[in-house]
Image: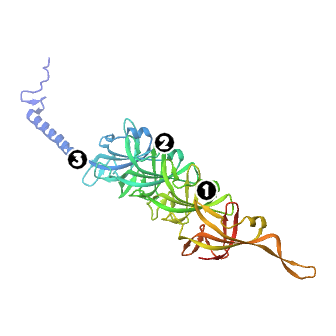
Amino acid sequence: MASSLSILDEDGNLFGAINVVDALVVLLVCAVAVAGVGLVVGTDNANTELGTTYVTLDLGTQPSYIVSALNEGDTYSADDESNLTITDVHLAPGDGQTRAIVRAELRGVADNTSFEYAGVQPQLGRQLRVSTSQYNTSGSIIDVGDGNTIDRDSRTVVLRDTLPASGADDVTAGDEIRLGGRTVATVEEVAVYPTGDADRHSVFVEATLNTYTRQGDQYFGNSQLRSGQTVILPGDGYRIEGEMARVGTGMDRDTTDVLIAETVSTETAEQISVGDTATVAGYDSAEVATVTTYATQNPDRERVFVGLTAETLGYGEQPQFGTTTVREGNEIRFRTDDYELSAPIERVGTLEQSGAATNRTVTLRMTDVDEVMADTLESGMTERAGGRTTATVTDVTVEPAIIITTADNGSVNVVDHPYLRDVTLRTELRVRETTSGIRFKGDTIQQGSTVVLDLGSVTVSAEVVTIGQ
């Protein structure tokens, strides 16, 4: 029976073919070769490093559940070598939802010349996904650079809007606008003015906004802070979607004296009193300081001159009363529970009519007056307005009116009218002397002008004949 195969023969050969020493040499060479391959691969991996950069993402408007979950420290891994971590959050009201701007740290593959996150370089406009266990969203890169925080600031703006009366009542200084548990704006001051619709008010809000810098400009959400842009402030019971009337400073509240004039019903004229205050949504807008009332040719209508101390805003070149620039000719509204005035401004910076008040002797004449009416006129009759005498009749002359008739033979005759009379009134009128002439009851008078006198029992309309001293 043959002997079994021996690993080493008597000469020391492996399996009778390879010397043991030679075999060890072969194994050593193979090991060195394998190690060499490993060193080459290891060198390539050593040149691939992980780096970090920061980006600002505009996530757009987001529903409330995402806003509530969105927070610093949220992370997302795009792949094994790409990781995103939110480091700062800016919220602002959007159109029905909340606009979210976040700062994020990106970990990705970097070398001496480039950085890649999820296989691409983070450039302006690229979309990046943010997906966590609570939400899934994406945003556009609007800034790339250093720093883990958004470049923040706070800016004062003045917003103007028109709100329903119920909403305007709720706007209050000190209101904090909060989103996702964060205060994003604070209402500092409020001014409310009437509009042509009693159910809607013009609202001005001075607010401090938490803003961020984007390419050198200040933004609140997606709104750049400049005049004319729109900002949304959703408060408790109201929603302001206001145009920025001023940026960087507040309303500069002040008071301005103005004089307005309007012809109103006699009932309204009797209701106007010094001290009347126009209150809109709980805010005072103006107060009556002076009232002067004059009769008109219509006994049911009177002309009133009302001096107002108005609550104005100084954010423009001229004071503003609501949306109206305070200058002569512009119309402003004054509304109380009892009456409303909507009248052009006669003067700014004063409560009185122009000119110095004085008395003048004025001769008036009326022609073809009914005899019965003429007989009611007598010396001593007066016109009074606001507790002051504006006119006094000092003398009355009544003469028959003249008529011209033609007889049957063709002759022309001048005869007295049987019942019509010509009346001459000598009066003492309270006038105002101005650089442009003499004014009576707010109108300039001269020879040929018509004036109206309410003498109590009768109202007369007469032509000015002479104006004396």
Residue at the image position 10 percent from the left and 35 percent from the top: 24
Q: Position of residue 200 (x, y in %)?
A: 55, 49
Which of the numbered marks, if any, corresponds to residue 44? 3
Residue at the image position 37 percent from the left and 42 percent from the top: 182
Q: CA distance from mark 3 to mark 2?
A: 64 Å
Q: Position of residue 391 (x, y in %)?
A: 62, 67
Residue receiving disc 1: 269
Q: Secondary structure under badge 1?
A: helix
Q: In the image, 163: left or right of 56?
A: right
Question: Which is closer to the viewer, label 3 or label 2?
Answer: 2
Q: CA distance from mark 1 to mark 2?
A: 38 Å
- Tell me, yes or no, if residue 128 can be seen here: no
Q: Earlier in the sequence, mark 1 or mark 2?
A: 2
Question: Which is closer to the viewer, label 1 or label 2?
Answer: 1
Residue receiving disc 2: 237
Q: Secondary structure under badge 3?
A: helix
Question: Which is closer to the viewer, label 1 or label 3?
Answer: 1
Q: Nearer the viewer, residue 87 or 360?
A: 360
Q: Earlier in the sequence, mark 1 or mark 3?
A: 3
